């Protein structure tokens, strides 16, 4: 009985440990996308060279 | 409502705030017109120069070829329609490559030139312009593959930073242009003359579509115009049509039609007339217009024989062959 209880406790610990580890790995894997999309926002669109406001020479 | 008028191409789109031009990629945000695909190509490949097609410009060299989404034409037979008929937000694959990155990528791939191609680089004009300046600073060449539907002022400015172009002359008929591409003929003719005046190396492509633009009398008039306005040494490529996009009801161009068109153009006085999209055809190769010597033998996009002298002349009669030879 004691052994079974102990194993149960170990199973829960193992699961918790694996859950935390999995979460950390997911965070590391997602990091390039997070940084990448932040970089994308920084790449502003270039203003066009040939245009005018409507009505400016009408 | 802060509308803007785009002045890059003859469409002169009036674009409301939040909207885009006909090309889908020049957008009005807060009363400013922005090039939404600047630094965001959706296609990047290394191609042989012959694929552009450019036969008299650095033959046999690899060229780093890019395009973004969008186009200011809507050709029913477009072979790049997934790219050209999409806006920037509709494309799944977008790379990040500002002009500095672009030049570095081209150099890393062993290319000494960059081609702005596939869709139409008119619609990513600023990206082409800025990248071309940096490419020149790095000792590279710039190649502009286009349908030529652009206003003269921006084109003249662009010609200062590009080195070669293949421009489509889709038909010598304004009605064809309106029905099949949504554009008009005269601005394309003006663009061809501008390239010539500005000293950009120029080759012309005509895609022959059965029943639509394969009339021999039109081909003759087109060839005579090219000879008189652009010069008899301007290479002309007749390309074979294949059913594509919204033009799947027509058959591929017969070989005889291409042969007759080539002969018609040569009879009109053009010296270098080629057949494209048919591998193994003698029209893929370059011959001396004086004595018929085989100068450059091509099999598809590959050069199997190169007989020009180091200064671009026929080895037997010394006739100079126009081009930019390595």
Image (cartoon, rainbow, N blue to C red):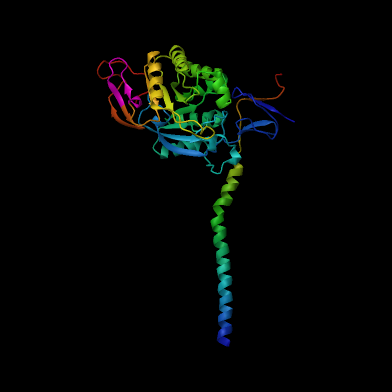
Q: Is residue A22 among what the camera can see?
A: yes
Seen in the image, is A9 located left or right of residue B48? right
Foreground residue, B183 or B309? Answer: B183
Foreground residue, B172 or B298? Answer: B172
Measured from the top left, where is residue A18 in percent x and y? 55, 69
Question: Based on the displayed image, in which of its 4 quarters is residue B317 positioned?
Answer: top left
Question: Based on the displayed image, in which of its 4 quarters is residue B60 positioned?
Answer: top left
Q: Is residue B309 among what the camera can see?
A: no
Q: Which residue lies furthest to the left in this view?
A: B316
Measured from the top left, where is residue B33 in percent x and y? 65, 30
Q: Is residue B288 magenta?
A: yes
Image quadrant occupied by the C terminus of chain B: top left
Measured from the top left, where is residue B248 in percent x and y? 51, 34
Question: Based on the displayed image, in which of its 4 quarters is residue A6 positioned?
Answer: bottom right
Measured from the top left, where is residue B227 in percent x and y? 43, 13
Seen in the image, is A30 located left or right of residue B319? right
Segment tinted magenta in the rendering: B282-296
Q: Is residue B117 magenta?
A: no
Q: Which residue lies furthest to the top in this view?
A: B228
């Amino acid at each position: 009985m004691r052994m079974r209880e102990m194993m149960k406790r170990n199973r829960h610990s193992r699961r918790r440990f694996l859950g935390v580890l999995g979460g950390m790995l997911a965070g590391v894997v997602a990091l390039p996308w997070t940084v990448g999309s932040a970089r994308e926002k920084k790449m502003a669109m270039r203003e066009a060279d040939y245009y005018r406001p409507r009505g400016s020479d009408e | 409502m802060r509308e803007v008028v785009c002045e890059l191409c003859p469409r002169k789109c009036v674009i409301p705030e939040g909207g885009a031009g006909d090309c889908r990629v020049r957008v009005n945000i807060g009363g400013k017109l922005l090039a939404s695909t600047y630094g965001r190509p959706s296609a990047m490949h290394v191609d042989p120069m012959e694929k552009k097609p450019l036969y008299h410009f650095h033959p046999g060299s690899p060229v780093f070829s890019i395009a973004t989404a969008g186009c200011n034409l809507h050709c029913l037979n477009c072979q790049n329609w997934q790219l050209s008929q999409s806006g920037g937000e509709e494309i799944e694959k977008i790379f990040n490559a500002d002009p500095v990155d672009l030049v570095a990528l081209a150099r890393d791939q062993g290319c000494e030139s960059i081609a702005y191609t596939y869709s139409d680089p008119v619609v990513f004009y600023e990206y082409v312009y800025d990248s071309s300046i940096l490419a020149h600073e790095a000792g590279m060449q710039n190649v502009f593959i286009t349908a030529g539907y652009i206003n003269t002022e921006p084109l003249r400015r662009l010609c200062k930073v590009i080195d070669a172009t293949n421009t489509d002359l889709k038909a010598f008929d304004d009605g064809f242009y309106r029905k099949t591409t949504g554009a008009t003929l005269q601005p394309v003719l003006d663009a061809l003359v501008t390239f010539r005046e500005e000293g950009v190396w120029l080759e012309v492509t005509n895609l022959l579509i059965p029943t639509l633009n394969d009339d021999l009398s039109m081909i003759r008039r087109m060839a005579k115009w090219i000879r008189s306005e652009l010069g008899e040494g301007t290479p002309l490529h007749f390309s074979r049509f294949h059913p594509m996009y919204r033009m799947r009801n027509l058959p591929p161009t017969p070989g005889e039609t291409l042969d007759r068109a080539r002969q018609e153009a040569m009879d009109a006085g053009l010296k270098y007339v080629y057949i494209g999209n048919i591998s193994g055809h003698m029209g893929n190769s370059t011959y001396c217009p004086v004595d018929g010597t085989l100068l450059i033998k091509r099999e598809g996009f590959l050069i199997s024989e190169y007989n020009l002298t180091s200064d671009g002349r026929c080895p037997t009669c010394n006739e100079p062959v126009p081009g930019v030879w390595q």
